Image (cartoon, rainbow, N blue to C red):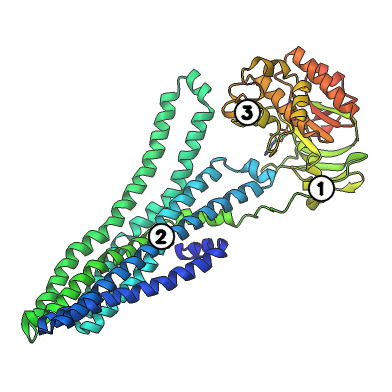
Amino acid sequence: MSPFRSFALLLKALSGEGRRRLMALAALTVVGALFEFAVLAALVTLLRQWLGGAGSAADGRAILLFVAAVLAAGAIRFVLLALTQRLALDTGHRLIVAVQRRVLAREWPVHAAARTSGPLAAMEFAEQWLYSTLLPLLQAGGALVLALGILAGLLWLDPLAAIAAGGLLGLLFLVANALVRGTIRRGGAALGDGYEDRIAAVQENVGAMRELILAGARGAAAERFRRIDRRLTDARTRMQVAQGVPRILVESVGLVALALVAWWLAGREGGISAALPTLAALGLGAQRLLPLLQTVNHSLIALSGSSSIQDRMVAFLSEPDLNLSPPPPPLPFESEIRLDGVGFTYPERSEPALREIDLVIARGERVALSGANGSGKSTLADLVMGLLRPTEGTLLIDGKPLSPGAVTGWQRNIAHVPQAPFVADTSLEANIAFMAHDPDAARVAEAVRLAGLSDLVASLPDGLATRVGDRGQLLSGGQRQRLALARALYASAPLLVLDEATSALDAQSEGHVLGALDVLQQRGTTILIIAHSEAMLARCDRVLRLQAGRLV
Ligand SMILES: Nc1ncnc2c1ncn2[C@@H]1O[C@H](COP(=O)(O)OP(=O)(O)OP(=O)(O)O)[C@@H](O)[C@H]1O
């Protein structure tokens, strides 16, 4: 996609309040340009009066006018700077939040199939885009208008000299730009992959630390990371160097060009003294014009270099947005969950993971799923939880097919405990009352007791306020599982799904969990358990066996 088109798409996706502020910024920029014009006009008036030997009163007025114009132009430039930064950073903020919303809006299968580094890289892309493209472009828009104001001043003063100086500078910028465009575009295309690969490598190194230590492979991991970062750094270096080329070229050759214009002016009728006001205005104009033109040029280069990053942001923003309206009430669940001829094939697979499943789970039942690895147990649980949609047959709740629109309401009935639960780096209590604004202490205490965590909590100096570390690293595997169980108990949902959730528990802890499940069942909770332990299976009302995706 062309950089201009993807830029426009990005802005469109973020439009709204920002557009109003952009208009205000544009209007103020025009006022700023008028004042730049006024500064030049005041300077020329002042010089002409001095050279013409006008009276001191006239001199005083001209000086006052010049000072007022300079101060006003400076004040406007300061306000423009503040507004531009604010608009750019706010737009960046909206972009980052918008991307994160798209990530959170993803359906489970999309999320499961996606590279986990993608959303992290997207944040880095948004920052990069903000500082390397949006901010320079906004500054360039302002710079262009201000530059036009200065050019207008010079044209008014001496059209021929202005056209000669402006034309030469413009031509130089065009040539310099053409020289580096290819390098910038190639470097920009490499950046997107580079950032994502670097984040993926960090994630892998951190996630695989134990394996890396034991395999003596930390050096190899460091070398792999070095190569990835080297590629990224090389691409960035090429871009940075290329971006600097136009500036150097214009500054050195541009100076020569201006000197030539001065020499030509001095040779005209009236000599150097008649040319002095024009020369002074040209000097001041060039001093203001050059950085402005450089800003414009730099941002155009940045825009063409950021196309791969922009394309990725556009891809994120074209995913469905998150529905931020309050969640629907829980779907009524009084009698049963029914699977009617249900089959499921993962999009990347040709063989179905599940075939012709006919099954009824009555409300309040405790049902176990067993079977060999890969026989389809987790897939069946994911279908029941509405995380996956059957590719064959129908899932019915209380006799009604579960429509896509009803899935969120259905999921409000479910508490799920996976084999490797997510544990946040916060307190035990906050982990149990997960995402609750105001944890209910009595419910937390009951969840702790039922999940068999009372002894652990009592042994910790900070009790429930104890932090559990990143991903719960400060807990044992069994303690993490019991913590996740306590979280599910706190949620007190009518359907509890345990997916090998007790695999790390010793016999005593497992006995404790079995007791908790008895309590829940007496309260009417329906329980679906994936387990291999005989003790777990023995306490279920029914054990369903899966073999190669079929119930046997
Ligand atoms: N996200 C996925 N994409 C593609 N195929 C998948 C995905 N998840 C699971 N599968 C495949 O679907 C089949 C059933 O997997 P599933 O995880 O349901 O088995 P399981 O009985 O729960 O296994 P285990 O006891 O090892 O947890 C397997 O062949 C597996 O490779």
| 497 is higher (above) or lower (below) than 155 | above
Percent x, y for residue 272? 7, 79
| Quarter of the figure that contains the C terminus | top right
Q: Is residue 266 left or right of residue 164?
A: left
Place residue 373 in its image quadrant: top right
Tell me which amino acid carries mark 2.
Ala
| Circle number at residue 82 | 2
Q: Earlier in the sequence, mark 3 or mark 1?
A: 1
Q: Are marks 3 and 1 in contact (CB under 8 Å)?
A: no
Q: Residues within 10 Å of mark 3 (few under 14, many from 20)?
A: some
Looking at the image, which residue is at 82% across and 30% down?
528
Quarter location, residue 531: top right
- N-terminal-most mark, 3 or 2: 2
Q: Mark 3 falls on what kind of element? A: loop
Mark 1–mark 2 Cα distance, whole angstroms, equals 46 Å
Residue at image x 53%, y 41%?
117
| Disc 1: residue Cβ within 8 A of ligand 1's nearest atom | no
Residue pointed to by mark 1: 329
The disc placed on residue 427 is 3
Where is residue 400 shown, x and y percent of the image?
90, 48
The amino acid on which the numbered mark 1 sits, given as a three-letter code, is Pro
Can you name the residue that lies furthest to the front here?
A: 57
